[in-house]
Image (cartoon, rainbow, N blue to C red):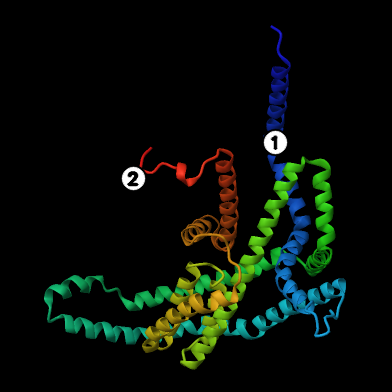
Amino acid sequence: MELSPNTKRFLLLLSGFTVALVLFVRHITTIFSFLAGVLNTLSPFIVGACLAFILSVPMHQFDKLLGTPTKKGKVLLSSGARRLVSLVLAILLVVLLLMLFSIIVLPELINTVSSLASSVMNFVPIAQGWLSDTLTWLEEYPEIHAAIAPAIPDLNQVASSAIAFVQKYAGTAATTVVFSVSSIFGSVADVIVSFVFAGYVLLQEESLSRQCKKLLYAFLPKGFCDETLSIAHLTHKTFFSYVTIQCTEALILGVLCFLGMLLFRFPYALVVSVIMIFCALIPIYGAIFSCIVGAFLVLMENPMQALGFVVFILVLQQLETNLIYPRVVSTSINLPPMWVLLSVTVGGGLFGIPGMLTAVPITSICYTLLGQRTHRQLKARGLTPDHFYNPDNPK
């Protein structure tokens, strides 16, 4: 029986795929070891690309500030000099923030974790007194006392468990952070290579963009290149806008929290403010987590101020959401609140903290692309909302 050319081509491709699959399965350990070695070799450049994106946020702000014309309508620096000065200022800003965190914030965090155990033990007798008074008062109501008393835990045991939890996981967290930083940067040479690569990327951003476009259009179909560049532009715009918005919002919220806690004399002002800055980078859940952690710290130090702290944080969140956020941020991600909640929940459940940080911009990109695709399909089919099925007015 004579086989058609299409059948021969299909059988040939199937045979090649089968052979490749068998070779892959037989040498899977060697292949993964090779890929791990390649990834380890390229890790300084991957970290450098991430640093370039992070540094691009303050760098573009400095570039915009330095590019403002004077009263005579002249710009003091040329485009190349302005970009170089903006890069140096961005690096100095990041280094300054890291130094401030290491000198001021980190020792305070360590002292807070160290003193938390004693704060918990000091709080136990006070809480025991409250429970004893409450149970004594409830003895006048035997039915309520009989229902509530068995459910009240032993505070000494709870305190011991809390102290053990803090000591165990605080040390684990510190070890994990140190190990992660060490594994990312590896050595001083890798750090230097990463920063140098990031500098080259930022200084030659336009040149690299032109080269990538030339390669795409030279070897791939024009329609595919247009679609790829459109998605790349949307991705960069969404992530850049999201990082700028979240960092600005987190910084303002942390500063206001610090000043407010100093004004109302709440304890742990610096630690709670730093926690709020980092938690504010995570939509929805970050605000809830920072409020719970801050209330717990204040409760351990001064139980009478815990309720006032919660009220203060709620007022601050409303002030930031309704007054500061619209004035500071001129653009926002194109994503309804329902999808923000869903994306953060799913991203955190699948990938932890990194998933929660990146879920919103990724979902926003998919949401925008799906909306554009749906609009094109409806337009191609000549359909409008008037053509959709309406149960109140079926056609």
Q: Position of residue 192 (x, y in %)?
A: 81, 69
* The C terminus sits in image quarter: top left
| Label 2: element kind | loop
* Distance CA(mark 1)–CA(mark 2): 58 Å
Q: Which residue is mark 1?
A: 24
The residue mark sitting in front, 1 or 2, is 2
Q: Which residue is mark 2?
A: 392
Give the quadrant of residue 239.
bottom right
User: Does residue 271 sit above or below 60 in this rendering?
Assistant: below
Residue at 28% in and 85% down: 130
Q: Amino acid at mark 1?
A: Phe
Task: Please tell me which residue is depicted at 52% across the width and 67% down the height of the picture.
Answer: 283
Residue at the spot 84% in from the left edge and 49% down from the top edge = 214
Which sits in the foreground, 14 or 160?
A: 14
Please give the name of the residue rendered at 56% of the width and 50% of the height, measured from the top-left corner: 371
| Other residues around mark 2 within 10 Å, as few (<14) / some (14–19) / many (≥20) | few
- Which element type, helix, strand or loop, lies under badge 1? helix
Q: Is residue 78 left or right of residue 260?
A: right
Percent position (x, y) of residue 15? 70, 24
111 shown above or below 28? below
**Amino acid type for the residue under numbered disc 2:** Asp
Q: Is residue 368 left or right of residue 49?
A: left
